[in-house]
Amino acid sequence: MAGLAAPAASLLHSNQFQPDPRRSALGIPGPYRGRVVAVAHPRSIISGRFQAEPIRAMMEKGMLALTGAGNWAEAWRLFFEPGDVVGIKVNPVGAPHVMSCRGGHHEIVDGLKSAGLKANDIVVYDRYRREFLQAGFDKILPEGVRHSAATDHFEQVQLDINGYDPEHYLEMALVTPGQAPGDPHTRRSYVAKFLTKEVNKLINLPVLKDTSPRA
């Protein structure tokens, strides 16, 4: 699990942002800011297939090492509580080989449930619905867990913001060649609407990838 975070207030413009003095003690940045725990298991992948028991063992070892908690449920309760709506960000961009572990999010869902969350308050998502479905994430979601996306598919110039919140965005210092720098729409990266309207905590499941331009 890599990250329980929210957009940095210093970078994210929001016409709606107001500090909430009643917010939970389990909010961002949390008690373990910047701490990294590494775990490994020699049998987590056999013949190219993820193995459920070693993955569970790694997840439990990592959560207990991070928090110092006495057990699995106690560790998750240090971050989450009933009433939270949690987004789990998966990355299907390199499917079928370079993508978020499709078995790992089952253990995350189990951890969230152990902290008292309902399955319906857990949303597995990616930016592009089509990539999410092509990777098969929708077919292996635990019962009751929802999935969502910001838009249907990738476009070289993504200007359709119907699935995004126009009042929450990151101002970028660049535009695509040929676009008007004076048009704010071309230089803003908007936050998915369901994240600003529904989700209050995020779990990120990234992959190692290179997104630099190709010659």
Image (cartoon, grey):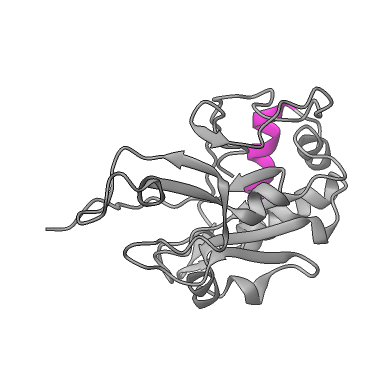
Is residue 60 one of those drawn in magenta? Answer: yes
Image quarter hosting the C terminus: bottom left
Which residue: 31% across, 65% down? 156
Residue 170 versus residue 118: which sits nearer the camera? Answer: 170
Image quarter hosting the N terminus: top right
Is residue 135 one of those drawn in magenta? Answer: no
As drawn, is 172 to the left or to the right of 34?
Answer: left
Q: Main secondary structure of the magenta part?
A: helix
Which residue: 77% across, 54% down? 110
Residue 164 in which image quadrant: bottom right
Residue 38: give x, y in percent of width and height: 52, 36
- For the record, the magenta segment spans 57-68
Residue 5 versus residue 54: which sits nearer the camera? Answer: 5
Residue 84: give x, y in percent of width and height: 80, 45
Which residue: 40% across, 68% down? 154
Name the residue at the left extreme: 215
As drawn, is 100 to the left or to the right of 52?
Answer: left
As drawn, is 130 to the left or to the right of 15?
Answer: left
